[in-house]
Image (cartoon, rainbow, N blue to C red):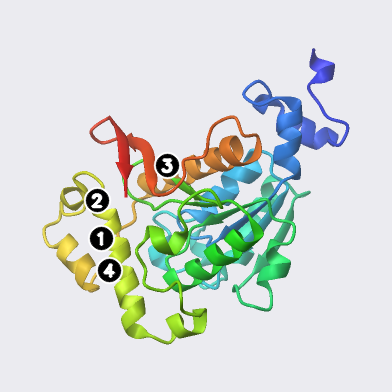
Amino acid sequence: MAKNRKHVNWSKFYTNFINRNIGLVSVLEQEKIRDTTVAIFGVGGLGGPLAENLVRSGCEHIIICDHGKFEESNLNRQLCFREDIGKQKIDVTEEILKKINPDIEVCKSLEVNEDNISIMLKHVSIAVLTLDDPVTSIYIARKCLEAKIPLLESWGIPYLWAWWFTYESIDYETCYKFNTKKLSISEIRNSEDIIIDMKIKILDKLQKFPEVRKRYDREKGTVKGLLSGKLPLVSFAPVVRMTASYLAFEVIFSGIIKAKKMILAPKVLGYDYINMNPLILEL
């Protein structure tokens, strides 16, 4: 039995590295995990820990994209340390991932644009959207739909959930009720009113989760500040890290080895872990 718990493509290091995975996944499934290319757009609170989870699970082909640099406010949840303040997120993320497995292939980019998106998605099997930029998110969603690449998304809120955008689901812009489908990306980006409207609609969507306003207003006035734009988005390490882990689970079990069905937008099947109740919504 022990001799069969490895694949011909695995090095001795890789075999030892992922040995405890086998059972929850088969050897052939583990090889699919190793060989599948996953693109992560945004390596902040969700994307960074997601990348770490995927690499620790045995993924060896990762694409990461983020233009940001680490700030002190990122230390409460993101994949960084104090010495990383001021450094590019993609550089720090790559360094950490390669400390876990030096054999991984990490392709990184500071931005997504017309010049690089086709090359970036050429060998991608699964994409994950972990951005807080709605315009870039629309562009990525459109390109993934064109290429028939499944796109996974969630938000770092205190509910365990994620949904997929595929050619079988509702499209990204329709899901969020954006009035942008007939507009080019440059037209959207150049309109402050459209961008504000999109951000409002995203917040409206998130407010449909049960008791969400109550949960974010334990310090009174927080929700009002969030909705007015005077306060930054609230992000708390246990919440964000659980969501990131669930995204990794979805990538692997729904996207790569297909051991569970994809939950297609706008449907939400998840878990309210504060009230300990199943979460069944259509947003």
Pair 3/1: label in front: 1
| Dot 4 alpha-carbon crowd within 10 angstroms: few under 14, some 14 to 19, many 20 or more | some
Residue at disc 3, secondary structure: helix
| Picture residue at 37% right of the left edge, 68% below the top | 178
Q: Position of residue 139 (x, y in %)?
A: 53, 70
Q: Report the residue that reaches farthest toward the top.
A: 1
Residue at disc 2, secondary structure: loop
| Picture residue at 63% right of the left edge, 55% below the top | 148
With respect to residue 186, does 100 lie above or below?
Answer: above
Mark on residue 200? 4
Task: Report the residue marked by disc 1.
Answer: 204
The reply to whether dot 1 and dot 4 touch (C-beta < 8 Å) is: yes
Mark 3–mark 1 Cα distance, whole angstroms, equals: 23 Å
Task: Report the residue marked by disc 2.
Answer: 208
Residue at disc 1, secondary structure: helix
Q: Amino acid at mark 2?
A: Lys
The reply to whether dot 1 and dot 2 touch (C-beta < 8 Å) is: yes
Q: Amino acid at mark 4?
A: Ile
The answer to whether residue 149 of the structure is visible from this angle is yes
**N-terminal-most mark, 3 or 1:** 1
**N-terminal-most mark, 2 or 4:** 4
Q: Amino acid at mark 3?
A: Met
The reply to whether dot 2 and dot 4 touch (C-beta < 8 Å) is: no
Mark on residue 242? 3
